[in-house]
Image (cartoon, helix red, strand yellow):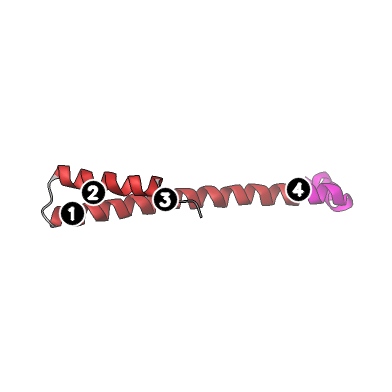
Amino acid sequence: MDSIIESLSSDPGVTLGVILGALGILGLTIMNVAKEWRKVRQAEEMAALKATLVERGMSADEIATVVEAGSEMEVSKPAV
């Protein structure tokens, strides 16, 4: 362990490589967590929408029509 620490402190190229590698791994981890968090939020919003539609007394077919229309709108949104 001491030899690893010594080589990191004595060679700036290795130190830079380790720092950049760690930042890359951290960045990928943050991106993955954000992506999964977004999926959870979308599922929560969809569940809330469906619950609202059920409270309004809509049938299953009507709810499916609303959900499908919403997913078609997301697909056809122009890129920003």
Does any portion of residue 5 appear in the rendered image?
no
Q: Which mark is residue 11?
A: none
Residue 64 pos. (x, y %): 21, 43
In this view, which residue lies farthest toward the right?
Answer: 10
Please state which of the two labelled residues, at mark 1 or mark 4, is closer to the viewer.
1
Q: Which three-letter amino acid code belongs to the residue tagged 4?
A: Val
Residue occupied by mark 2: 66
Task: Bin the neighbour count of mark 1 within 10 Å (Cα to Cα): few under 14, some 14-19, many 20 and up.
Answer: some
Q: Which mark is residue 18?
A: 4
Q: Which three-letter amino acid code belongs to the residue tagged 1?
A: Leu
Give the residue at x 74% y 52%. Answer: 19
Earlier sequence position, callout 3 versus callout 1: 1
Q: Which mark is residue 53?
A: 1
Q: Which three-letter amino acid code belongs to the residue tagged 2?
A: Val
Asked if the residue at tag 2 contacts the one at tag 3, i.e. Cβ–Cβ closer than 8 Å, the answer is no
Q: Label 3's element?
A: loop
Please state which of the two labelled residues, at mark 3 or mark 2, is closer to the viewer.
3
The CA distance from mark 4 to mark 3 is 41 Å
Q: Which mark is residue 77?
A: 3
The CA distance from mark 3 to mark 1 is 24 Å
Over which residues does the magenta segment extend? 1-17
